[in-house]
Image (tube, helix red, strand yellow):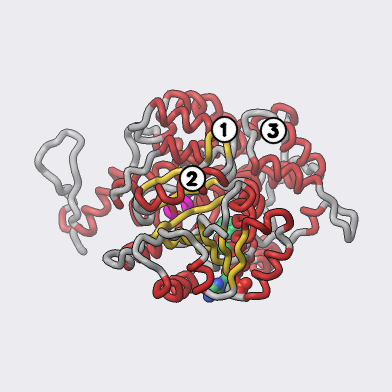
Amino acid sequence: MSQAEIGLIGLGVMGANLALNIAEKGNRIAVFNRTVETTRKFHADAGELKSRIVPCETIEEFVAAIRPPRPIIIMIKAGESVDQQMEALKPHLASGDIMIDAGNANFRDTMRRFDSLKDTGLTFIGMGVSGGEEGARHGPSIMVGGTEESYARVEEVLTSIAAKYDGEPCVAWLGENGAGHFVKTIHNGIEYADMQMIAEIYGILRDGLRMTAEEIGEVFGTWNRGRLNSYLIEITEKVLKATDPLTGKPMVDMILDKAGQKGTGKWSAIEAQTMGVPATGIEAAVAARSISSMKEERETAEKILGLPSVGEFQVADKAAFITDLENALLAAKIGAYAQGFAVMSAASKEFGWSLPMPTIARIWRAGCIIRSQFLDEITSAFTKAPDAANLIVTPAFAALVKETDGALRRIVSAAVLGGLPVPALASALGYFDSYRRGRGTANVIQAQRDFFGAHGFDRVDGADSHHGPWGSGLNG
Ligand code: NDP
């Protein structure tokens, strides 16, 4: 029997689906899982794909089943388990073999793992995979970081399994070492912001306009046929319209308002902060998840403080207000994506990756959780203006911001006056208003810093004196 083209370790939710996808596209694949029973069951349930799958119960058998140089996808729990799995594999591998971590790794771990294999003849790929279970099975978006030579060995298989947008595969080599996992992290950070903004809009419709889940679902359904067309808006309509089989009530009304998080949103915010790039939408979304998890504290605070006493939420023209909500969400989304791309641009310089922005937008158009028509417009904007300092100053997006930021301002104002929390929507407005203002207010901060710490400042007229006339105020 011919050898497998590729190997995969870890038959959990993602690994099993990815393996079936690989086999379905005509590739022969060897699989291994720590718990042997899982491998047996996976193979037994693989139906007509069984003949292309080589189930292996030992690492020796697994490695021997793959054609050298062996590409081996490791799709297991992120963190130390990946290091342990790599150590277990190493003694069985030969020069040229490639270990591919496809889990949600922190890109700094990926860089460390990549470096640890230098001088061993083995290579490492850090591969971000997005699209959840469905994407893994039928076509994910794949972000690859590693050497270009190792990518060449797996390009054909990855191209065959990736999602397609207008026939173009959503997979690309993005740069050396941690580039793929970094881009996947920022993808997730943007996803956090996008989801939070949708949740805030839902909150205005539920608590402001007092609409039912079903009615709000209708609104999202309409939006999904317009400029907000995207996977997240599509599934929001579906979840809002779903009924709880136990009570017959709307499913969302029966779900506890505590959101989980696994770390990629937080990592995005940390990296943005480390590089000094504002990513306020992502930060607001991470903080909102943290506040959501403080359910008991929030309930106690509501008893002590009460809800803001702002009276009835007043809307004169409901239809116009809902159109404003649609445009506000679009504007806020532009802010979050602009920030995400700005973080990647800074990281590209910091880590010497040359991240290709139009390509990143292109491979996010299908397969991944943030897939949308909007990403096609970002692809086009960055293709026309690859050196733009920020997405919002490209001609197409500058026009979109000018068209929609009025709606965002009206919606944020209405929410604030109505006592409804909109931290992510407000962060986008604050970002636009700060970024577009040539003369800001940091002159006062510089003066304060100079006053108490003699930090000095630059002058607008370029004159020589770099300290203020604060008298004896320089007191440490
Ligand atoms: P699951 O929990 O479904 O599966 C975990 C897998 O990891 C199992 O095969 C398990 O083996 C294996 N495993 C756990 N610990 C070890 C270890 N110490 N050594 C060897 N194998 C181990 O996870 P998922 O499939 O959901 O996730 C896998 C990776 O993909 C994670 O990094 C996750 O963050 C990432 N990811 C997940 C997405 C999702 O939507 N679920 C989306 C994109 C990425 P065993 O059967 O023996 O327990």
Q: Is residue 126 visible?
A: yes
Q: Secondary structure at mark 2?
A: helix
Q: Secondary structure at mark 3?
A: helix
Q: Disc 3 vs disc 1: which is toward the camera?
A: 1
Q: Which residue is mark 3?
A: 223
Image quadrant where one finds the N terminus? bottom right
Q: Disc 2 vs disc 1: which is toward the camera?
A: 2
Name the disc covering residue 167, or none. 1
Image quadrant where one finds the C terminus? bottom left
Q: Residue at x 53, y 69 (%)?
A: 62
Give the percent coordinates (x, y) of residue 285: 55, 52
Give the percent coordinates (x, y) of residue 203: 69, 47
Looking at numbered disc 1 in the image, what kind of residue is underneath it? Gly
Circles 3 and 2: CB distance less than 8 Å?
Answer: no
Farthest left residue in view: 464
**What secondary structure predominates along the stretch shown in magenta?**
helix
If you read the primary sequence from the N terminus, does the residue marked by circle 3 or circle 2 appear first?
Answer: 2
Q: Which residues are magenta?
A: 181-186
Q: Disc 3 vs disc 2: which is toward the camera?
A: 2
If you read the primary sequence from the N terminus, does the residue marked by circle 3 or circle 1 appear first?
Answer: 1
For label 1, the crowd category at 10 Å Cα-Cα, with few meaning under 14, some 14 to 19 and many 20 or more, is few
